[in-house]
Amino acid sequence: MPELPEMETYKQQLHAILAGKRIIQTEIQREKSINVTADLFKQELNGAVIVKIERRAKHLIFHLSTGKFLLLHLMLGGWMYVGNDQDAPNRTKQITLTFDSIKLYFIGLRLGYLHLHNKQTLEDELADLGPEPLQGNFNREAFQQLLEARRGMLKTTLVNQHVIAGIGNCYSDEICYEAYLLPDRGMDMLSEEEKDKLYSAMVSVLTNATQLGGYMENPLFQGDQLTGGYNDHCLVYDREGMECNRCHSKIVKTEISSRKTFFCPGCQK
């Protein structure tokens, strides 16, 4: 599932491509992917201009010139492609937005969605999300205060969107590894020094992953050299049985609260 670095990569690239472009046509092949009738969805979108694209947690927010918003959550298996019918992936597209000479295809939205909102309903939808981990005012002190009363496991805390927004399975494992901490450690058992290392690891991993384009490999457009660049830099995620780069122990895969989890039993404590 796309996480903060993937969605930030999508945001930056899509904004550069689509900001200022007018939606000419809207095609919907799966009405369950939207939250209003197909007719109303098309009526609201056709003719509207994409003013800007923002990210909140694992969501993208498309600001429309009409004052309405599109809220995207790709969920598991969802991705996007910008191009035309000649180079588009041979996959079922749930929603297609046509601009001047290009189209934006939403693919794999079986669990994901593209919902139409006004300002109030958008705010309501996002109200219970935690702080952005890379936001300037979310510093070490704010991080320490946030974790002060937490008593759950490290992994489940990091992926809890109500606590910190945007982190999922991949980056929670990478953060724990970077901090030399086991993902099943209890938050209330971490020392102040360990929490400080955790904060540094979170910022470092998410920043690096974003700069490298995240780990999702499907290109956003033909010739895309950025998207998925972090995939070759994962140190524990999806590396079960491979050697740890630090201590040469074998990476282990387990489950924590039904989530697949990867860690090194040799150097994570």
Image: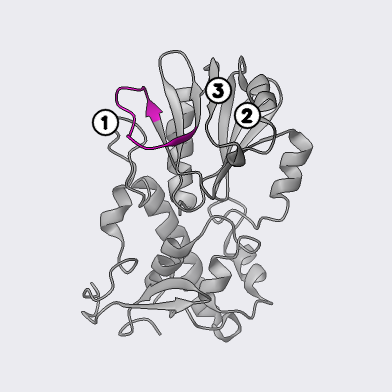
Q: Could you tell me the amino acid type at mark 3?
A: Thr
Side (left or right) of 108 relative to 23: left
Lower position in the chain sequence, tag 2 or tag 1: 2
In the rendered image, residue 119, in percent from the top left (x then y), is placed at: 75, 34
In the rendered image, residue 36, in percent from the top left (x then y), is placed at: 70, 34
Q: Is the magenta stretch mostly helix, strand or loop?
A: loop
Can residue 217 be seen here? The reply is yes
Contact? badges 3 and 1 (CB < 8 Å): no
Near-viewer residue (269 or 86): 86
- Residue at (55, 32) in percent of width and height: 53
Contact? badges 2 and 1 (CB < 8 Å): no
The quadrant in which residue 51 appears is top right
Alpha-carbon span between mark 2 and mark 1: 26 Å
Task: Locate the C terminus by quadrant.
Answer: bottom left
Near-viewer residue (243 or 107): 107
In the image, residue 87 lies in the stretch drawn in magenta:
yes
In the rendered image, residue 240, in percent from the top left (x then y), is placed at: 28, 73
Q: Name the residue under label 3.
A: 26
Q: Could you tell me the amino acid type at mark 1?
A: Gly
Near-viewer residue (59 or 207): 59
Element type where label 2 sits in the image: strand
Give me the disc on residue 63.
2
Alpha-carbon span between mark 2 and mark 3: 16 Å
- Is the residue 45 above or below the residue 223 in the image? above
The quadrant in which residue 166 appears is bottom right
Give me the disc on residue 223.
1
Lower position in the chain sequence, tag 2 or tag 3: 3
In the rendered image, residue 88, in percent from the top left (x then y), is placed at: 34, 29
Q: How crowded is mark 3: few (under 14 residues within 10 Å), some or many (20 or more)?
A: many
Element type where label 3 sits in the image: strand
